Image: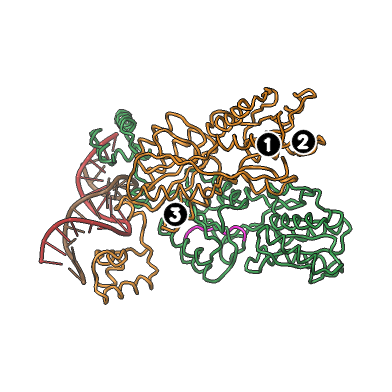
Chain colours: A orange, B green, C red, D brown
DNA sequence: CTGAAAGCGCTTACAG
DNA sequence: CTGAAAGCGCTTACAG
């Protein structure tokens, strides 16, 4: 492999000068500059970023920790992150926890050992060990999706999104509204969205039937099963609408209703959250909420880049959203 | 930051010994080992992988070059890659060309400068400069999706998949079969799939109507537009089936047909390729072909890891596929 | 079983 | 405008 020393020798200068020319730092005569650039060209010399990173303590790499790579939300967010960081010649070091909390912590340390300049975590839960690992890491850090105490966070407006959707369902005349949620380990999805629903029901003096509230695990199948439990458990009395906290589960729910011969939305209306591509093309098209995941990724990246230049206090940003009315309600 | 020197000092040994203990290479007395491990624990010492990489010439990082991050195919493949490499404690450095050929080349060089141990390229085109850049890089390299000359490649069986799908359409009684494809810059999708269709039509003495052959650009919208051109251009005589080379375009095509009041499959049958999640949940469910993208990613990763241990001649692997009959045909 | 020394490929004060 | 030297944090022959 050719190194900076080889280039220096070939150009009859010191490697100091070569470094200066390559990085455009400090002076160098035009003549020397040209000579060096030509040799670089000829040899196809590629500087070692490991060496540079060791020396400068900067790697030009951003660590991204994902709960699950092959998910539409994740890939949109990563797309957004990449758009921003690529412009500044940063790369992304990708890491997938497969929803394992241990790995979240392990990866933070790993990314640190790889000298990433900063980390963006798509957070799915909150726990003390996570928080303290982040504090110890002492790196520019952004949490996306959960409001982590002491950590700069970008969150979706889960509570108000759920309120709006529930209100929307009511505005269509629904009074008997069911709910398919997820576990509370994920506060944003599991608690905030549920509270938005519950509070709105209460405010409007609507009865919440416990049989109509089910808990899934984000998968399409679990949405299917939850809806089955609602229909079977209802004993004749069914909700006229069901609010599902993710599109995937909503689509599972719709599948079950289709199978059983229920008309959507005439018999039972269904609404989701996420604005997945799928949501638009299922029949009927799913009423849902767009969280602008890509924009959230961009925002996270911008924030991180900013913090690379100057560190700041913890901040909290709440993303906007948009309710998309379609045919399923 | 605490370094190996700090640990050595605190443990009253040389950094040589610390290194040996940490890497489990060579001897060290139990007593010393324990002492060192305890100090590592206490200090939260994290070794610098940049330094290690500079010294050992190995980074433990695999470079992945994607045409577009936020695509279902890409995220499945990356998921597969990650599953395999994570087990061996490798990380993924992710790179997105946004379908720009220049960037493909740029990123190969960049990944090289970052001392990745190998590269997996999700290839969408073939050109000489790309090939020669890969040769020059002199790194373990896997091409996924296109058969790059001189490069170990994993390809989908595009030709036979298209043949099978066309035959399947015929077996349902269709004789007038249209085709929505893509440009030839992408040989796998643009040429092989088209040839599979054309050859099969010819073999069965079926007329291919040029008006029924359209070219899109992978987007849902382009599928919509292509179908519009087929329907409008047909002048009364329409195909009874249309084979679309990707699910997304197929779904766009279906959307247009729905809008115009055509029944699928009674009036016009539609088939795609890709087995996207969406394909299963649209109405009617789309007949398509599963390429097992995740498995392809796994295979690519395994192959690369193998080559990291011992370099081998170029090889070519053809992945298997599966036709999924659903309701759209 | 342990350590001193060299070296990986860079950058950056410092001196001229 | 240019260079010699030190040093980033590791590993690895080599010697004992």
Chain ID of residue with mark 3: A
- Expressed as whole percent of the image width and height from the top left, the position of residue A150 reads 39, 34
Give the image quarter of residue B111.
bottom left
Mark earlier in primary sequence (1, 2):
1
Disc 3: CA contacts within 10 A as few (<14), some (14-19) or many (>=20): many
When the figure is inspected, residue B304 is found, relative to residue A252, above or below; the finding is: below
Q: Given contact means CB atoms under 8 Å apart, are the residues at marks 3 and 2 in contact?
A: no
When the figure is inspected, residue B290 is found, relative to residue A188, above or below; the finding is: below
Element marked by disc 3: helix
CA gap between label 3 and label 1 equals 43 Å
| Magenta range | B139-145
- Expressed as whole percent of the image width and height from the top left, the position of residue B282 reads 74, 48
Going by the image, does A296 lie left or right of B54? Answer: right
Q: State whether discs 1 and 2 lie on one chain.
A: yes
**Could you say which disc has been placed on residue A85 in the image?**
3
Element marked by disc 1: helix
CA gap between label 1 and label 2 equals 22 Å
Quadrant that contains the N terminus of chain B: top left
Q: To which residue does mark 2 refer? A: A257
When the figure is inspected, residue B122 is found, relative to residue B292, above or below; the finding is: below
Q: Answer yes or no: is residue B79 visible.
A: yes
Give the image quarter of residue A112.
top left
Residue at 41% from the left image edge and 58% from the top image edge: A89
Going by the image, does B69 lie left or right of A306? Answer: right
Mark earlier in primary sequence (3, 2):
3
CA gap between label 3 and label 2 equals 44 Å
Disc 2: CA contacts within 10 A as few (<14), some (14-19) or many (>=20): many
Going by the image, does B256 lie left or right of B36? Answer: right
**Residue A33 magenta-highlighted:** no
């Amino acid at each position: 492999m050719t190194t900076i020393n080889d280039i220096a020798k070939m150009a009859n200068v010191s490697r100091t000068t070569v470094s200066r020319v390559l990085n455009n730092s400090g002076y160098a005569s035009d003549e020397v500059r040209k000579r060096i650039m030509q040799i670089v060209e000829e040899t196809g010399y590629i500087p070692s970023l490991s060496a540079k990173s060791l020396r400068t303590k900067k790697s030009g790499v951003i660590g991204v920790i994902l709960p699950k790579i092959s998910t539409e939300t994740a890939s949109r967010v990563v797309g957004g992150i990449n758009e921003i960081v690529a412009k500044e010649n940063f790369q992304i070091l990708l890491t997938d926890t497969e929803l394992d909390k241990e790995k979240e912590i392990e990866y933070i340390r790993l990314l640190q050992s790889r000298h990433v300049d900063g980390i963006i975590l798509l957070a799915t839960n909150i726990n003390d060990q996570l928080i303290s690992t982040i504090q110890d890491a002492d790196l520019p850090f952004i949490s996306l999706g959960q409001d982590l105490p002491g950590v700069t966070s970008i969150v979706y407006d889960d509570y108000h999104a759920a309120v709006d959707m529930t209100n929307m369902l009511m505005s269509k005349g629904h009074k008997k509204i069911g709910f398919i949620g997820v576990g509370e380990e994920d506060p944003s999805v599991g608690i905030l969205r549920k509270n938005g629903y519950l509070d709105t029901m209460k405010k409007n003096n609507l009865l919440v039937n416990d049989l109509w509230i089910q808990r899934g695990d984000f998968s399409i199948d679990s949405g299917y099963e939850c809806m089955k439990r609602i229909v079977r458990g209802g004993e004749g009395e069914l909700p006229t609408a069901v609010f599902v906290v993710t599109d995937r589960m909503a689509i599972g729910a719709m599948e079950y209703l289709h199978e059983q011969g229920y008309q959507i939305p005439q018999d039972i209306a269904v609404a989701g959250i996420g604005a997945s591509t799928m949501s638009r093309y299922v029949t009927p098209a799913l009423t849902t909420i767009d969280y602008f995941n890509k924009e959230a990724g961009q925002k996270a990246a911008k924030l991180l880049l900013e913090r690379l230049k100057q560190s700041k206090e913890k901040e909290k940003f709440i993303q906007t959203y948009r309710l998309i009315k379609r045919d399923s309600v």
